[in-house]
Every structure is written in C-alpha cells, then in structure tokens.
Image (tube, rainbow, N blue to C red):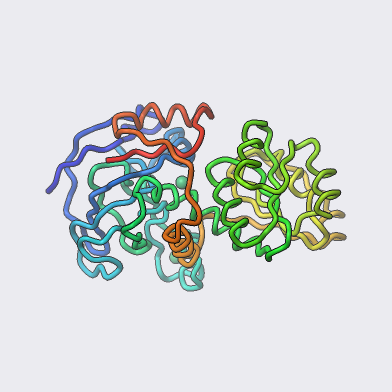
Amino acid sequence: MHSATAVCLAAPRGPVEVRRLDIADPGPGELRVRIEACGICHSDVMITGLEKLPLTPLILGHEGIGIVEALGEGVTQAAIGDRVGITYFGAGCGQCHACQSGHARYCAKQSNHGYTRHGALTTQAIVAAQNIIRVPSNLNPAEAAPLCCAGWTAMGALNEANVQPGQWLVIAGFGGLGHLAAAYAKARGVHVAVIDTNQDKLDFAKAQGADLVTLPDAARKTIQKEAGGAHAAIVFTASAAAAPTALSTLQRRGSLILVGLTTDTFPVSMTEIVLKGIRIQGSYLGTRQDLEQVFAIAAEGKVKPHITTHTLAEAPSLIQKLSRGEQTGRAVVKL
Ligand SMILES: [Zn+2]
Ligand SMILES: [Zn+2]
C-alpha cells in the first residue's frame, strides 16, 4: 500500500479537492507510475459536471507523464524506470471488432483514466498498461503531457482528414487541439486556414504560421476564393454552429471531420452533401500509431504545445477557470 496526494472529484457534480489517500498495488495488466506532470483537459471539466459517475471519489486527469515504479502481473508494455504517457483510453475488451481492427478507442467496453478508473492528477497513479506509451527521456514532461490527449486527438483527426502536401486544411477552433493540429499539418506541407470566433486566437494562429485566418461570417467566401475550397475541414470547437460553417468551406469531394463534443445538433443540406460528394466523419482520440507519431515528432523538437505550469494544489481552481473559458494554452500540473 502506498499513499498519494491526488486531485479528487468527491461526488458527482461534487467539489474537486486535493486529498491524501491510499493506493493499492498494481493488479494484473496495471502499472504504478510516479507522475511528473499532468495536463488539464476539457473532458475533466465535462466529467466534473456529470450527474452519475461509475467511481467516487474519483482521481481526475488523463494527460499524465511519469516514471514506472511497479508492474502488475503480465505487463509487457513497459519496464520499471521507463518514462511513459497515460491517456484517456485505459483498455479495450480485446474481443470486439473495434479492438481487433486497431480501433480499440471505439470499444463499447473500454475503461477510461480519470473517468471509469482513477486518473493521473496525482503524485502516484495505478493505470492500465494496455495503451501506455513510452515517452522519450529528452522531452520536458510538462510539454509532453498535453500530447497524451490534445496532441493525440489532433493527430488522429489530421490522419482521418488525409490531406496531402500542397492541399488545404481548415481548422475550426484554435484552442488546445487546433493549434497542435495546425502545427502537425504545416510540418507536412499542408496549407492551413483557421476559423475562430475570437480575434485574439486568429492573431495567435497567424503568428503560429497559419496561411489564412478568418472569422466564421467571412469563412466560406474567403476560403472558397483564396484557396479554391478546402480538401478537408476539422471541427475542434464544441460549438455545433461551427460545423455548417466548416462544411461551406469544402471543395467537391471534401471531408468534414468532427472532433469537438456537444449534445447540440446542426442542420445538413442533403443536396449539398450528395451532389458535392462530401464525406462527414467523427474522430475520437486516435490509433496507437497516431500516438507514437505524436511523440516521435515531439522528440525531433518540431512541435511544442503552448502551456502554463502549476502546482497540484492549483488544480481545482484551474478546472473552474477552464470551465469559464478563461484558460489560454494548456494548463499543466508539475509534480
Ligand atoms: Zn482529454
Ligand atoms: Zn473491445
């Protein structure tokens, strides 16, 4: 038995508090990790607002970087002393079609760190080994942490969009995911157009190398005129209004990739989808290869997330700040 200091959600919709608690030894297929850094994600905010939770009190967090301290039975994915990354995806059932086709993130029986099982916003974490990723030791842990969720999801969506060098990609929403997707796309020689409702974020996108930036109202006209329409558009924002705007910027045979989560809906013109041969697809997290690609690019020093660093004690107030939309860059807790 070990004791850890962790950021816990005490009850559904309950307070988020920093607590001292005992953690068990790792069971079969689990690892104990001494956490070095963990990012705070919009999904943490979403989880703190759910009416029901499978586990309480719940240790939040799913963007963890740390050093493996102990291995449970049958773990081959990492060794003691390895630096690893912990993601939202814990483990799939291994039996279903999704699991067997390399898309375990769509498994209906998956476990999730910081939701259905304890997460990584803690000094020490017991995590599922199945999707653990080895992280290069030369990476700064605080800069590596957001790659476990924001970076992975951005790369997953970019690879679904399947844009080639010289083609145009539209990114709707220049937040934690959007800025990483733009950087990954630019590194591939893809032209990037950014749509956002916030002029400061558009200025930031321009400074980060976006080829074109536009407010939503002018997006269709600007992107159709300047780029001849985009080959693909990825909607990272959780605003349903962003989807028809992104759709209107596409070329014929273009792809619309939806990533931001909202329970709102948007109207679709079936005529436009059919006659233009548009593909609409959802994208959630990424494949194992996407995650490996994210860390390989980071190790080359090509793409760095914009972060602010904080103590564990600040985590409850950071979650509130993020829920109010006041956080710029990714907030990362350093341990
Ligand atoms: Zn996340
Ligand atoms: Zn499965």
Q: Nearer the viewer, residue 185 or 61?
A: 185
Q: x%, y% of residue 274?
A: 84, 60
- Residue at 14% x, 46% y is 2
Above-or-below relation of 154 to 198: below
The picture places residue 41, in percent across and down from the top left corner, at: 45, 41
**Which quarter of the figure is the C terminus placed in?**
top left
Q: Is residue 282 left or right of residue 89?
A: right
For ligand 2, which image quadrant applies?
bottom left
Residue 19 x/y as whole percent: 23, 32
Residue 209 in the figure: left or right of residue 20: right
Q: Residue at x 29, y 34 (%)?
A: 312
> How many numbered discs, if any?
0
**Where is residue 216, by image quadrant?**
top right
Q: Residue furthest bottom?
A: 100
Residue drawn at 17 percent across, 50 percent down: 24
Q: Is residue 107 visible?
A: no
